[in-house]
Amino acid sequence: MSSPETRVAFVSGDRLPGWVDRFAASHGALAEEELDAGLQLRAADGAVAVLRAPWPVDGRPGSGHDAISRLASLAGQPRSIGTVLVRRGGYSVAVVSAGAVLTSKTGTRHVQSRTAAGGWSQQRFARRRANQADALVEAVAEHAGRIFAEHRVEYLAPGGDRTLADQVLAEPVLRRYAGLTRLAFLDVPDPRAAVLKKAAAELCSVRILVTDPQ
């Protein structure tokens, strides 16, 4: 028997009740259960959706008469997020709130791909590649430090290449933000303006992991 398929959806707070209604219409009556991973909805046909808030409650719970309403209200709150999206082909750093980009810097810096060549040329290539990656990390961190300082950043949201993003956030210029909560990592392609715009919307949306019935 094949494994059930899973997929991820991002739904803004104002659209969440409608999404849940459509999920129930497609899969049957829903049973709710609050888990550490989020709010689980198990449908009559075996489909499961786990709904995760975009950020912690942090003393500002959502309002509403049921769990869906409270989650939608929480996701609709304006929170300020410092975003670092970086891959070998480019970067975007931004401050995001309410699904929109408040201020940002996007650029391209190419880090060469790995080579299969051996010997001295491979060693020289590896050093050049490492130097390019170091320069990318330092440049992105500098841009992030300047942009973050213009706003009151509440959370950090890394994305792209996990290793590069972690290196950027570990740079001394961003030390003041080290204690902030990190939101769920975003898997994005080489950052461009359109990629950043989509990421901003997703960062402020409910993340839903849907497992289809077998």
Image: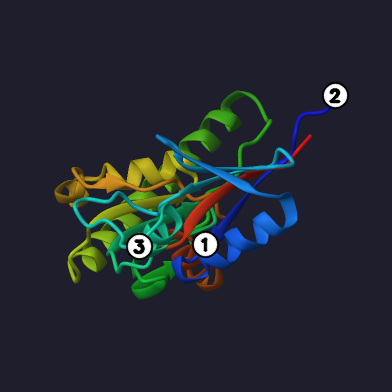
Distance between the Cα atoms at labels 1 and 3?
37 Å
- At a point 49% along the width and 50% down the height, the residue shown is 186
Which quadrant holds residue 92? bottom left
The residue pinned by badge 3 equals: 64
* Lower position in the chain sequence, tag 1 or tag 3: 3
Closest to the observer, 91 or 98: 98
Closest to the observer, 90 or 200: 200
* Lower position in the chain sequence, tag 2 or tag 1: 2
- The image quadrant where one finds the C terminus is top right
Q: How is the rendered protein coloured?
A: rainbow
The residue pinned by badge 1 equals: 191
Q: Is residue 2 above or below residue 82?
A: above
Drawn side of residue 139 relative to residue 163, left or right? left
Drawn side of residue 147 relative to residue 10, left or right? left
How far across and down, in percent of the image, does residue 195 sit? 54, 66
How far across and down, in percent of the image, does residue 95 sit? 31, 67
- The image quadrant where one finds the N terminus is top right
Q: Nearer the viewer, mark 1 or mark 3?
A: 3
The kind of residue on which mark 3 rests is Gly
- At a point 66% along the width and 56% down the height, the residue shown is 23
